[in-house]
DNA sequence: TCACTAATAT
DNA sequence: AATATTAGTG
């Protein structure tokens, strides 16, 4: 039995009272190994083994983790016992459940990297590669969060990719914003008359538009995964801020200066890629027709895109939120366009509409009915590419078609191309089964019952103390209030448990 | 202290 | 060019 709860204070109580494991809700991808491990242990030993820090520590340490651990040692973090870093410990430390409560903090390179070579000489901190998959997740996160709320930490959480760090995201976000800015400027220029361009350019680089406007354009970043478009105008040195536009164009607008990688992102994605099946107008198919408002000072252009290809007019849905408080004014925006489409006047609409679509299938389910079948489909197991040095394992306990390891990476370099999308789905599915209902809610979960390969548990150790969690009480009538159980059909692809060893050998987490 | 961003380094 | 790291800010 394990306990899932949104209240991390329940951890001690749960474990004290006999829970095999405590998992905070919402369940993260990084929690999956614990669940797997428990199920596997049960299958092998006939009973579960309480997940403690000790009995799993150092047993399964992924390359990324090793790297990170070493790095932390090098940084002197070993002097102060870290509680748990969601990024660095994850599955190695099963008892570490407060995934978000502490995070690795960079402690300036004072101690250097010499110590790093103590136990694992060759491993070096890897350089993250933002693969299409990661990019998709990144963009999804931004879409989900809305641009103005998309800050590294939230993006990171939403992406739910264990090895990612906030710094990774921050850096990428910076690049992303720069890209948007660039695109906006480009689009901006395309809107201006030659005279206007001359006027602006004669003052050096574009710093601030004379008016507060944005130009319709599309970013390859967005077009790959977002069916909305964000447009971003560089604020003039903090004076006017910038605005974003949202359009619903149907094909990519391509700009020469967009890196090829991004330009072609859509096309490089297979059918599996998320939200990539959009067509957007390419630049040559676009007409920009716009009416500039005439009252300078508080005016906007009101651009609309004509996508010749489809013959449909793609209109700017709106841009800008008044008074949003992006704290460096990068994202702050002013005025908004009046869109031609009623009711779609705000940027947030587009995002929200996406979210509506995106989440329409999401239905929370009472934990009392956690046995019903999930609705999402798990693609069949496919080949998996690995580093050569990561072992011979070539399968994972769930679909691995999205997992990619870069053969070109050096040894020790993090397999940053891993696509956690599917595992994310797993964890998300769990979260549907065990939704976060209220603060402090909990689920007692029998990890064995629902598993086709594991017999029903009868080895749940009677708790020694009473608990506020009914199921954890010695005299609790289990029959009357059975614990939930994980629907292992979610995980039982390719006989998950049998492959778990391999899974852990890899230890992606 | 933490998180964010811009600037800078690699 | 793409990421990582640092420094300044709130």
Image: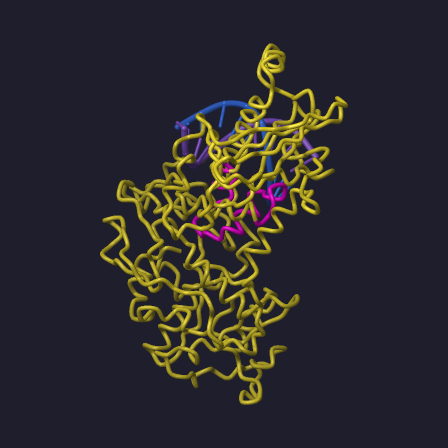
Chain colours: A yellow, B blue, C purple
Q: Is residue A171 magenta?
A: yes
| Quarter occupied by the C terminus of chain A | bottom left
Where residue A365 appears, as percent x and y from the top left, is 57, 72
The relative height of residue A269 versus residue C10 in the rendered view (above or below) is below
Q: Does the magenta stretch include residue A136?
A: no
The relative height of residue A212 versus residue A345 in the rendered view (above or below) is above
Residue at horizontal 68 percent and vertical 40 percent from the top:
A340
The relative height of residue A429 versus residue A260 in the rendered view (above or below) is below
Q: Quadrant of residue A116?
A: top left
Residue at horizontal 56 percent and vertical 58 percent from the top:
A359
Where residue A149 appears, as percent x and y from the top left, is 62, 44
Residue at the extreme front: A311
Horizontal side, residue C7 vs residue A382: left or right = right
Where residue A240 appears, as percent x and y from the top left, is 70, 26
Q: In which quarter of the image is residue A246?
A: top right
Q: Nearer the viewer, residue A140 or A289?
A: A289
Please report the bounds of the magenta region as a residue range: A144-172
């Amino acid at each position: 039995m394990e306990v899932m709860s949104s209240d991390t204070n329940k951890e001690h109580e749960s474990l004290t009272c006999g829970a095999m494991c405590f998992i905070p809700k919402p369940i993260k991808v990084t929690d999956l190994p614990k669940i797997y491990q428990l199920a596997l242990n049960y299958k092998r030993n006939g009973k579960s083994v309480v997940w403690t820090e000790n009995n799993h520590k150092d047993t399964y340490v992924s390359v990324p983790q090793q790297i990170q651990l070493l790095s932390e040692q090098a940084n002197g973090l070993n002097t102060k016992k870290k509680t748990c870093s969601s990024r660095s410990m994850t599955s190695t430390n099963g008892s570490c459940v407060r995934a978000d409560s502490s995070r690795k903090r960079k402690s300036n390179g004072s101690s250097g990297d010499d110590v790093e070579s103590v136990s694992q000489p060759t491993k070096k901190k890897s350089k993250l590669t933002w693969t299409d998959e990661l990019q998709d997740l990144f963009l999804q996160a931004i879409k989900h969060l809305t641009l103005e709320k998309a800050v590294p930490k939230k993006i990171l959480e939403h992406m739910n990719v264990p090895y990612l760090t906030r710094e990774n995201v921050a850096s990428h976000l910076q690049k992303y914003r720069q890209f948007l800015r660039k695109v906006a400027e480009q689009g901006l220029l395309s809107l201006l008359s030659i005279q206007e361009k001359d006027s602006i350019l004669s003052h050096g680089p574009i710093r601030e538009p004379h008016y507060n406007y944005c130009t319709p354009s599309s970013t390859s970043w967005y077009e790959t995964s977002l069916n909305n478009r964000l447009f971003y105008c560089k604020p003039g040195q903090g004076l006017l801020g910038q605005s974003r536009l949202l359009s619903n164009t149907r094909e990519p607008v391509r700009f020469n200066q967009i890196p090829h990688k991004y330009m072609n992102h859509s096309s490089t994605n297979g059918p599996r890629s998320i939200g990539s099946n959009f067509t957007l107008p390419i630049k040559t198919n676009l007409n920009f027709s716009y009416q500039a408002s005439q009252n300078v000072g508080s005016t906007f252009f009101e651009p609309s895109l004509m996508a010749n290809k489809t013959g449909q007019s793609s209109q700017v849905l709106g841009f800008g939120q008044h008074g949003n408080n992006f704290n460096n004014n990068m994202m702050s925006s002013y005025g908004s366009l009046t869109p031609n489409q009623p009711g779609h006047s705000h940027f947030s609409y587009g995002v929200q509409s996406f979210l509506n679509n995106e989440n329409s299938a999401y239905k929370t389910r009472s934990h009392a009915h956690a046995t019903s079948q999930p609705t999402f489909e798990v693609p069949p197991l496919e080949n998996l590419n690995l580093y050569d040095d990561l072992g011979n394992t070539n399968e994972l306990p769930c679909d691995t078609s999205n997992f990619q390891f870069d053969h070109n990476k050096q040894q020790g370099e993090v397999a940053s191309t891993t696509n956690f999308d599917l595992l994310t789905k797993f964890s998300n599915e769990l979260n549907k089964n065990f939704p976060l209902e209220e603060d402090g809610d909990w689920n007692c979960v029998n990890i064995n019952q629902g598993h086709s390969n594991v017999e029903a548990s009868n080895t749940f150790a009677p708790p020694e103390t009473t608990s506020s969690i009914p199921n954890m009480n010695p005299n609790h009538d289990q029959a009357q209030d059975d614990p939930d159980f994980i629907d292992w059909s979610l995980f039982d692809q390719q006989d998950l448990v049998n492959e778990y060893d391999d899974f852990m050998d890899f230890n992606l987490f």
